[in-house]
Amino acid sequence: MSTEDVRLPADDGESVAARWFLPDGDLVGVVTIAPAMAMPMRFYRHLAAWLAERGFAVLTFSYRGSEPELYGPMRDSSATALDWYHDAELAAGHAHARADAAGVPLTWVGHSFGGQSLGFLSDVGVDSCVMVASGTGWRGKAVPMIKRWSPLLWRAIAPVAIAAVGYYPGRRLRILDDLPAGVMRQWGRWCLHRDYLFSEHPELRDRFVKVQTPVTALWTADDELISPESIRYWSKEFPNAPIEFVELRAADHGLSRIGHSGFFRPKRAILWEEVLLPVLPTSSAK
């Protein structure tokens, strides 16, 4: 297995940092892993390497402005949440080029916010999608704790913190992670509205309607952020995509906990073997 760092040029002159994990032997498929909100690209490296060892070329990427070591000071970033969806679209197009050249299928593995971005990929040619803990961001469908306390975050804590330091210092506050100001502000507005991103961009629903990619929607019984109702509510935005809902219970796989992000941690790699690998299409199915 080897890695290859690339920069994906965007139409506005910006670029998106990405890393390929490449197999040593024959290529059986291409996978793109789309990060959750406030989750760095490196978080997914263990799964990417594991898949590469099984013949998949795996692309991980970082949303613009999200990691200072890749993009410079976060307070200088002008990125918005909508920009991040377009970053996902850019990564998907780059991954599709490799899959198309090799004649192998492309799978989109989207974690939370990354799964939402499938709605922007209807013209890319994604063969399958695995959404992991991906539901609507609207607080009305969140777990009780998030539903209760999120208005305080969006209307008071985040605005004050952003005004003080020029970005959202989630790491210091121990609420999410650091985020560019524009991303946090826009995402907050969406999360307070039942229509989520469509509250500001109703025209985007047409793109979601066009999606026909088969989806496996994974949700964990012990998710501390996303509820089953949130996942099913979000799935209605993809009326033409066949969706299979799969509940993951930790005890069924010999685990004590999975949670919102645990699926991607190497200590829970049993889930990759038992749940993820069987739904990934390979060259024999292309």
Image (cartoon, grey):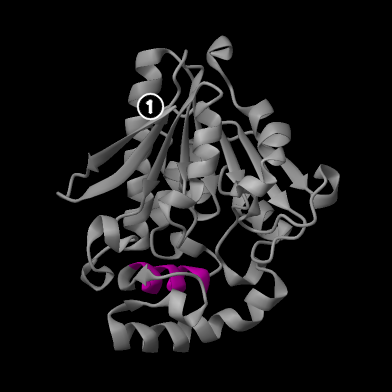
Task: Give the left or right position of residue 151, taking residue 144 as reference.
Answer: left
Q: Is residue 63 above or below residue 150?
A: above
Closest to the observer: 197 or 9?
Answer: 9
Q: Is residue 185 magenta?
A: yes
Residue farthest along the left direction in this orientation: 13
Q: Main secondary structure of the magenta part?
A: helix
Label 1, residues with CA under 10 Å away: few <14, some 14-19, many ≥20 = many
Element marked by disc 1: helix
Q: Is residue 222 magenta?
A: no
Q: Position of residue 140 (x, y in %)?
A: 63, 71
The residue indicated by pointer 1 is 96
Start-end of magenta stretch: 183-192
Q: Position of residue 236 (x, y in %)?
A: 62, 49
Q: Position of residue 120 (x, y in %)?
A: 41, 43
Residue shown at the point (69%, 69%) measured from the top left: 143
Specify the quadrant that holds the N terminus.
top left
Task: Give the left or right position of residue 133, taking residue 210 as reference.
Answer: right
Residue 256 position by quadrant? bottom right
Residue shown at the point (29%, 38%) measured from the top left: 5
Quick check: can you spot residue 108?
no
Q: Position of residue 81 (x, y in %)?
A: 37, 61
Closest to the observer: 208 or 102?
Answer: 102
Closest to the observer: 236 or 244?
Answer: 244
Residue shown at the point (81%, 43%) measured from the top left: 253
Numbered-mark total: 1
Quick check: can you spot residue 279?
yes
Amino acid type at image mark 1: His
Q: Is residue 95 above or below residue 72?
A: above
Q: Is residue 127 above or below residue 134?
A: above
